[in-house]
Image (cartoon, rainbow, N blue to C red):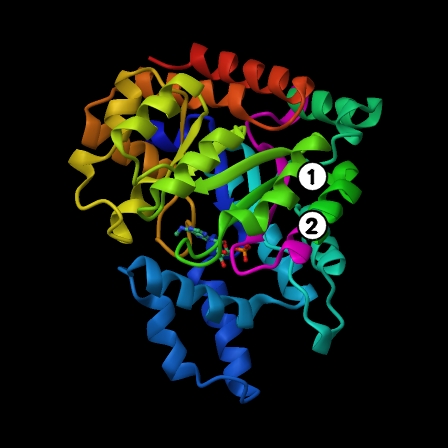
Amino acid sequence: MKWWVSMPKIELHAHLNGSIRDSTLLELARVLGEKGVIVFSDVEHVIMKNDRSLGEVFKLFDLIHILTTDHKTLTRITKEVVEDFASENVVYLELRTTPKKNDSIGMSKHSYMEAVVEGLRAVTTVDIDFDSHKFNTQDSLNSIAMNDACDRTKRKRIHVRLLLSIDRRETTEAAIETVKLALEMRDLGVVGIDLSGNPVVGEWKTFLPALKFAQKQGLYITLHCGEVPNCQEVQLMLDFLPQRIGHAIFFEEEEWRQLKTSKIPVEICLTSNIKTESISSIDIHHFVDLYNAKHPLVLCTDDAGVFSTSLSNEYKLASTAFGLGKREMFELARNGIEFIFAGDEVKQDLVETFDSAAKKLN
Ligand code: 6MZ
């Protein structure tokens, strides 16, 4: 097995509906085609298309949401996405999704999230910890210890935590509803809030009350920041001091300075940035400057399904493009432990996992 696949990895920026297997999307499209809800042949090439502009990506998400937004499908895709990440040795996953309401099928934001949690419970091919309470119970520790002793080579283990996304199309009230839901679901592995969606839509002032409320209540916050040129918004986001930001592409000199001083960790999504042409070539990606400045960084997939990538592939890509060796990539992955939104017990467990893997690194 290649080292970028076998080494433990931490995924902190993965959108649920962007991480679905193509085979599952096609299967769902076929079923809706048969029911006459969509025309399968119109949709097939849209799903299989490889390179999309940022605008086209958001059109694709509208289509994906038609295919996936029912309780049963959400449970299925959550289970599959977690199992796919675990299969490539992702040992900690922060999965984000936008809770959606659909009155016609009796879906509330709450029932949407319940279906997602059901998907975590349905994971069978790997051992999963997603419930912050249960991780501390003797039962759960015993089962992990037993697994360690008997089966470590066969069964993989993954910690999963959830972030609820606010879509930039939403109103202040809808955003606050999402934050309230996150607070209600803290015991079910929800640790924070993400602001995402089409970056040319919506205004910072719309989301600020919800984000302030979340911050006050002790939820962690990550923001999609600088995905398109918008100096004023980038400034306001950095001033807000989120725990992490995603992308950080269109920054001016002053914003780079502010970011580096603030030490806010950046979630870097190489393939996503290249495929959406947000960055013209990997050689000029800001990863290099931030890495050389020892700025906190973590490699992530963004939308592994939509961009046909995997976290292992992102590590391989960074290693090849930036001339970094196996050890440097291992350290980069391990540094991610510091930026996760889960508690100290999980951090300690991850330190042990990386220590144990380090012994096998040659
Ligand atoms: C901004 C993105 C994104 O929430 O339905 N999303 N937002 N920039 C990106 N970069 C390409 N990729 C995904 O997952 C899909 C949703 O995540 C956000 C968009 O709001 C998209 O509709 P969920 O699980």
Residue 31 place in picture, x, y as percent: 54, 79
- Considering every residue shown, the one lying at the far right of the view is 138
The verdict on residue 156 being magenta is yes
Quarter of the view holding residue 42: bottom left
Q: Are marks 1 and 2 in contact (CB under 8 Å)?
A: yes
Looking at numbered disc 1 in the image, what kind of residue is underneath it?
Phe
Q: Is residue 34 above or below residue 357?
A: below
Disc 2, ligand 1: is the CB inside 8 Å? no
- Crowd around label 1: few <14 · some 14–19 · many ≥20 (10 Å): some
Left or right: where does residue 130 sit relative to residue 249?
Answer: right
- Considering every residue shown, the one lying at the far bottom of the view is 36
Res. 203 visible in picture: yes
Give the structural element (helix, strand or loop) at label 1.
Answer: helix
Which residue is identified by label 2? 176
Residue 23 place in picture, x, y as percent: 45, 64
Residue 354 place in picture, x, y as percent: 50, 17
Mark 1 vs mark 2, CA separation in Å? 8 Å
Looking at numbered disc 2 in the image, what kind of residue is underneath it?
Ile
Residue extent of the magenta highlight: 149-175
Kindly identify which numbered label has been placed on residue 235: none
Quarter of the view holding residue 131: top right
Q: Is residue 330 above or below residue 123?
A: above
Which residue is identified by label 1? 213
The numbered mark, 1 or 2, whose residue comes first in the sequence reads 2
Front one among 115 and 139: 115
User: On the rendered image, what quadrant is the N terminus found in?
Assistant: top left
Q: Residue drawn 40% across and 38% down?
A: 234
Left or right: where does residue 126 sit relative to residue 339?
Answer: right
Q: Residue drawn 33% across and 12% down?
A: 362
